Amino acid sequence: MPDRSQFLIAAPSSDSGKTTVTLGLLRAIANRGLKVQPFKCGPDYIDPILHQKASDNNSINLDTYMASSAHVKGLYNRYLQKSDVAIVEGVMGLFDGADKMKGSSAEIAMLLDIPIILVMNAKAMAYSAAALIHGFKSFQPILKIAGVIFNNVNTPSHYNILKEACKDVDVEPLGYLPTQPDVKIPSRHLGLSIAADINFDTLCDKIATSLKETVDIQRLLELTTRSTVEKINEEEPANNRRYTIAVAHDEAFRFTYHENLEVLKEFGRVVYFSPLTDSKLPPCDLLYLAGGYPELFVEQLSQNKSMLNAVHKYCLNNGKTYAECGGMMYLGEYIIDKQGKQFQMAGFLPLTTSMENPKLHLGYRSIFVNDLNIKGHEFHYSTCTELSEVEKLDCTVFNARQVALTPNIYRKNNTLASYNHLYWGEEKTFIDRLLQGKL
């Protein structure tokens, strides 16, 4: 196996510029004719969409809370084999996890034994960078911080001070990004950064061009090139095409983990459809209404009566359905937008969801159904109101700190729906039982 450049992009905190640097490097390295494989630490389903746009390659989630360490390492090695360069974007601050370092970028870097490129926001900082870099370098000496890229550097003289700070703590400075409002990525919390009116090709090109001028990309690749594992000979997953699985996928429904989709393919044929623009539901054995931003497209979704009626009829006739977050909102009676205006949805579940007074709900979830433990993540701003009594799945739910939560998985006919985004890339039994109606 050839040696490859492999590294994890981390930062002291969120909003330091990790995603900006990641997108720029993905595009700049791909423009060199190299196949670059993106990864994302944690349960994020938005940044991987941006990674795909920048690299033209699917980004893979690496999460040591939702999956075992063996699974995460196996995933990384499998996709690494198909690439020339592997870039892992971290989550939050380097050592921030669900419980201390559990699931953190640092834990992933240690598990994969890859070096770290630290991205630091230098907007209001000069030589003090030395103390911060020293602290991150010495807190877990087993980690290898290969270099630093500074963000929001005002002038070359400002960068000279930052270079001296790096030299004094024996970490290599690799360059900087100047403050550039036209390459700033909008907030991803409310879907603004993946809206259709943002030209991501242009944005990624701008970041890549800027990086090439002030970051030593060649030196970065040299510093992070390391020996790779021996080639893994994987058996092709069995697929006897027993089932057809219909997956909602368009601008409104796009929050899917890539490995979840790969597992669905092991059970049969996956067909994609658009609740926004298609008039009918594909014939299927399982309907997967993925998460997304239906609240940004409520008017268009509400006007597509033929699809709403088709989904309602399918669920009413006991069609097997799994709906998560945005998919659950779509199955309700109404979605209420930020202005308080309500839009009719499929009307299968007796609930309504509202964005009128948005409140963040966030955290890992561990769900126990009989002998099955399936893990996932909850991230939404909408609130849900039950309009009448509705059955819930008989299960127990815990957060990352093992605090019991009120079960919130709705069950009606053969439909399961909740705010949870589940990861079944490793726990394939979940899909098997869904298809067999045994949940």
Image: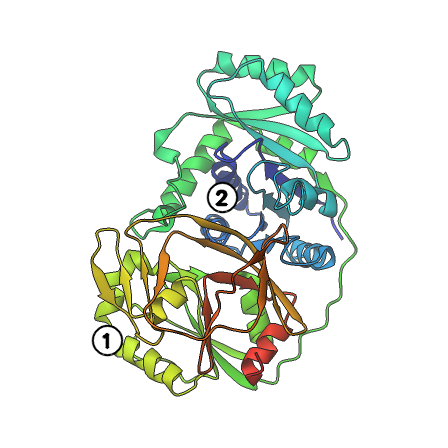
SS for dot 1:
helix
Q: Earlier in the sequence, mark 1 or mark 2?
A: 2
Q: Quadrant of residue 266?
A: bottom right
Three-letter code, disc 1: Lys
Against 126, residue 253 (above or below) is below
Coordinates of residue 84 in the picture (x, y in percent): 64, 49
Coordinates of residue 390 in the picture (x, y in percent): 41, 74
The residue sitting at 39% across, 62% down in the picture is: 326
* Camera-nearest residue between 327 and 306: 327
Q: Which residue is mark 1?
A: 305
Left or right of residue 207, residue 351 in this image: left
Q: Are marks 1 and 2 in contact (CB under 8 Å)?
A: no
Q: Which residue is mark 2?
A: 27
Q: Quadrant of residue 323?
A: bottom left
The residue sitting at 23% across, 64% down in the picture is: 343
For label 2, the crowd category at 10 Å Cα-Cα, with few meaning under 14, some 14 to 19 and many 20 or more, is many
Three-letter code, disc 2: Arg
